[in-house]
Image (tube, grey):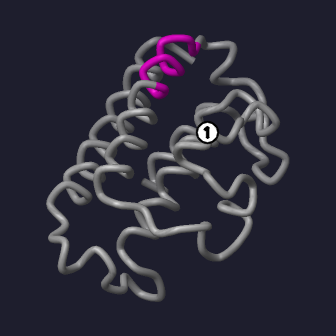
Amino acid sequence: MSNDLKSILESQFAAAWRMFVECVELCPESHWDELVAKYPFWLVAYHTLYCTDGYLERRETDFKLDPRFHPGGQADIDEEYPSRRFTKAELLEYARHCAEKAKRVFAGETAETLSGDCGFARRNMCRAELHVYNTRHV
């Protein structure tokens, strides 16, 4: 795997991320609690954020919950709904956290790490494919 692949993965993630953040920024308050399929908009955004945050880790076991974004601890992820409703400002703060984390993660990727195991038991793929999976999820 070359540096070109690393650049492609990073740029495609960044493009998807910009679109996601713009959706959150532009969501009118009147739609914040409106359903997107089965869930309110804010919850779909929250789900996207914590999945992105988690999948950016090198291994599943490295994901540490930040009380700013997971005040209910693991239950915020395991339950259908987190412990409380999040505001747009809070989710945009979480989005900034994830964007900074993504920059650090992509900067540290090498041909070796990208071709290695993704580190997530439920995902039988290499790390490069996990980045594609994460981007698609966004």
What predominant SS class does the magenta segment belong to? Answer: helix
Residue 104 lies in magenta, yes or no? Answer: yes
Tell me the quadrant of the picture where the C terminus can be found. Answer: bottom left
Rendered image quadrant of residue 7: top left
Tell me the quadrant of the picture where the N terminus can be found. Answer: top right
Q: Horizontal placement of 18 versus 66: left or right?
A: left
Q: At 49% across and 26% down in the image, what residue appears?
A: 101
Residue 127 lies in magenta, yes or no? Answer: no
The crowd level at tag 1 (other Cα within 10 Å; few <14, some 14-19, many 20+) is few
Task: Classify mark 1: helix, strand or loop.
Answer: loop
Q: Nearer the viewer, residue 88 or 134?
A: 88
Q: Nearer the viewer, residue 80 or 56?
A: 80
Write down the region rendered in magenta: 101-109
Rendered image quadrant of residue 67: top right
Q: Nearer the viewer, residue 46 or 68?
A: 68
Q: Which residue is mark 1?
A: 66
Q: Horizontal placement of 17 versus 84: left or right?
A: left
Residue 4 x/y as whole percent:
41, 17
Residue 134 x/y as whole percent:
53, 47
Residue 57 x/y as whole percent:
66, 31
Q: At 38% across and 68% down in the image, what residue appears?
A: 42
- Name the amino acid, label 1: Asp
Rendered image quadrant of residue 115: top right
